[in-house]
Amino acid sequence: SAQDSTLVTIKAGNKVGDVLTQADIYLYPQFTTGEIIFKDGKKVIVDMNYTRLFDQMLYINHKNDTLALADEKTIKFIAILKDTFYYDNGFVRIITDNDFVKFAEKQTWIVADIRKIGTHNTPKNTVAITSLTAYTDGTDAAKSKDLILNEDIVLRKETQYYFGNAYNNFV
């Protein structure tokens, strides 16, 4: 009962952005200056935000385009404001840590159900479980909230907690 079980239905013909607010999609109210520290020691400072919809770290490039980070396995960690993020099959945000263990969380929207549109435009539940990993073509994840869906999608807000070790491996 302590888990957030928020369910949101995006009806066929609607955009994701019509149902989910910016606060639902992004961790921060606006893109905020952050620092990417790479495993080779290189550092980059750029405006960033974490998107719960795709479990991606987005950044604004020099052309003012919003893009997703690529090749995340080369990143040691990301610092935005007082938050630290590590990448281990997705981004986790550190809640607390010490010399021996890290405690982290990941907040995402998970597809709970897909309702295909049947005859007379009535939704029907799918028989098989469908697992989607992205709602984007990969070119501009920030604009994917503008996708118009042709089926009803039920999303569930999910928070997962992780323990990490000194090598930044999380379970």
Image (cartoon, rainbow, N blue to C red):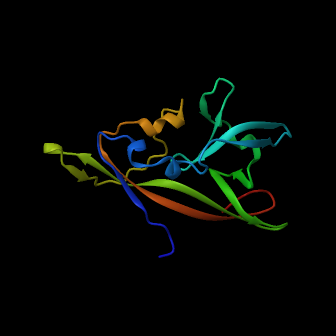
Q: Which of 14 and 116 is in front in this view?
A: 14
Which residue does the image show at 71% across and 52% down from the upper left? 85
Q: In this view, does 153 lie to the left or right of 97?
A: left
Q: Residue 146: which quarter of the image? A: top left
> Residue 145: image x %, image y %?
45, 40
Of all residues, the one furthest to the top in this rendering is 63
Q: Is residue 52 left or right of residue 83?
A: left
Question: From what the image shows, is residue 101 above or below residue 148?
Answer: below
Q: Residue 161: which quarter of the image? A: bottom right
Q: Which of 117 and 8 is in front in this view?
A: 8
> Residue 28: image x %, image y %?
61, 49
> Residue 124: image x %, image y %?
22, 52
Of all residues, the one furthest to the left in this rendering is 120
Quarter in which the C terminus is drawn: bottom right
Of all residues, the one furthest to the front in this rendering is 29
Question: From what the image shows, is residue 147 above or below residue 87?
Answer: above
Q: In this view, does 153 lie to the left or right of 55?
A: left
> Residue 74: image x %, image y %?
75, 40
Which residue does the image show at 81% across and 61% down from the upper left? 166
Which residue does the image show at 67% across and 57% down from the upper left? 93
Q: How many marks?
A: 0
Which residue does the image show at 53% across and 37% down from the upper left? 142
